[in-house]
Image (tube, grey):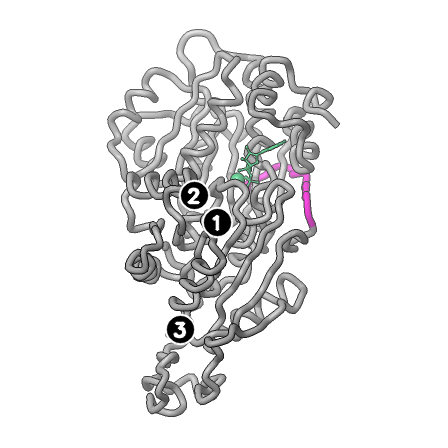
Amino acid sequence: MTFESLGLSSPILKAIEEKGYKKPSIIQEKSIPLVLKGKDVLASAQTGTGKTAGFTLPILERLSKNTSKGKRPIKALILTPTRELAAQILENVKEYSINLNIESTVIFGGVNQNPQKRKLKSGVDILVATPGRLLDLEQQRALSLSNVDILVLDEADRMLDMGFLRDIQKVMALLPKKRQNLLFSATFSKSIKKLASEFMHEPILVEAAPENSTVDKITQKVIRVDKIRKTDLLIKLISEGKWNQVLVFTRTKHGANRLCKKLEQKNISAAAIHGNKTQGARTKALKGFKDNNIRVLVATDIAARGLDIPLLPHVVNYELPNIPEDYVHRIGRTGRAGAKGEALSLVCVDENDYLKGIEKLVGIKIDSREIDGFEVDPSIPAEDPNPMRKGRGGRNGGKSKSNNRNGKKPNNKRRRY
Ligand code: ADP
Ligand code: MG
């Protein structure tokens, strides 16, 4: 299968060649012809499988056929949950459209609106946006969505997780009724299917991998360790393994900052990427990591979502995510493009339920072990039998010499990280 046989024409084929793509990925093979035909497409494939080109290339092909003369109204709208992802998609759109007369831009929050407004005023065919800034600028009449022919929801599952449902619905109300809808997602949850049924028109379902399965080429391991010793263990693993590029996930923004500080104290260069960081800081951290100037990138789930970090050999779950699907997204950052990757999870006694949920989702029991010198302290109770008791130290009332239980119930509510 070639890109040419999928129905793309030479300006786009040339651009793809320049990017070094030899042949379409499975999800591209399946989605490109459908999008070209104008169908509504509901596509699911793992992170790193080339979904962006899966919708961008056929959109460019369609738009290049009827470029409007004079003022350009927005013809295609790509909605995405995070700023980083939005910037990255725009970068791809620009690369793929290098030989076409197509204008594109990106808008997201956290930065000055004025340059965005100026660019919009000059006319764009393709707009990449995060929902909040889009609605804001629409309300200010800095843009109009009344000519949009194609809507893309990228990372749709994450948009729902982040609480963007209302915003998405508001955007929908601003679009023409007759349009093409494309929904791309790494996983297919019930809420995604429900959303799709609300706004899509006879969508065709395409999947590149079985639902929610993890990639075979990723080696998954669990290391059992007490909570208070996780940092020391991580430092040992990074130093002794001579890992030069490792992505570490924490559950909270504060946890990410704390871990970063401790790594730096041990002369391991690290940067955190999460929702409280300025756009500048996030971009700088990601660039430093990609350029190999920063050894460890510590991220929360939402910040890391969808980022294109190629050929990452190591992903570490410093804490397990409380949503099993996030585990699949996290480990999807390794083992890309045929490379082998390793996903390590540092699991303490508090996280047993999370682990069970994850194993149920991925359908395997993840190989679990301890590291010499970091054995789990058996004096710590395995489970708090009475969730009403919130005392420090769990069942033994904080008398344990190791206080790796804080007595708090895991918080299952989704938050903006
Ligand atoms: P996803 O959205 O599925 O997570 P991306 O669209 O971000 O994946 O693509 C992941 C990486 O794969 C990017 O670096 C992209 O340039 C590259 N890529 C996409 N399609 C191809 C292809 N057909 N051949 C080789 N590399 C590709
Ligand atoms: Mg993507």
Please give the name of the residue rendered at 30% of the width and 40% of the height, measured from the top-left corner: 279
Would residue 260 appear left or right of 311 to someone viewing this image? left
Q: Are marks 1 and 2 in contact (CB under 8 Å)?
A: yes
**x, y (%) of residue 252?**
36, 61
Q: Quadrant of residue 18?
A: top right
Task: Tell me the number on the disc at residue 158.
Answer: 1
Q: Which mark is residue 81?
A: 2
Along the polypeptide, which appears first: circle 2 or circle 3? 2
The C terminus is located in which quarter? bottom left
Q: Which residues are magenta?
A: 199-209
Question: Which class describes the residues within 10 Å of circle 1: few (<14), some (14-19), or many (20+)?
Answer: many
Q: Which residue is mark 3?
A: 229
Q: Position of residue 192 (x, y in %)?
A: 56, 50
Whether label 1 lies within 8 Å of ligand 2 gets the answer: no
* Left or right: residue 235 compared with residue 28: left
Mark 2 vs mark 3, foreground winner is: 3
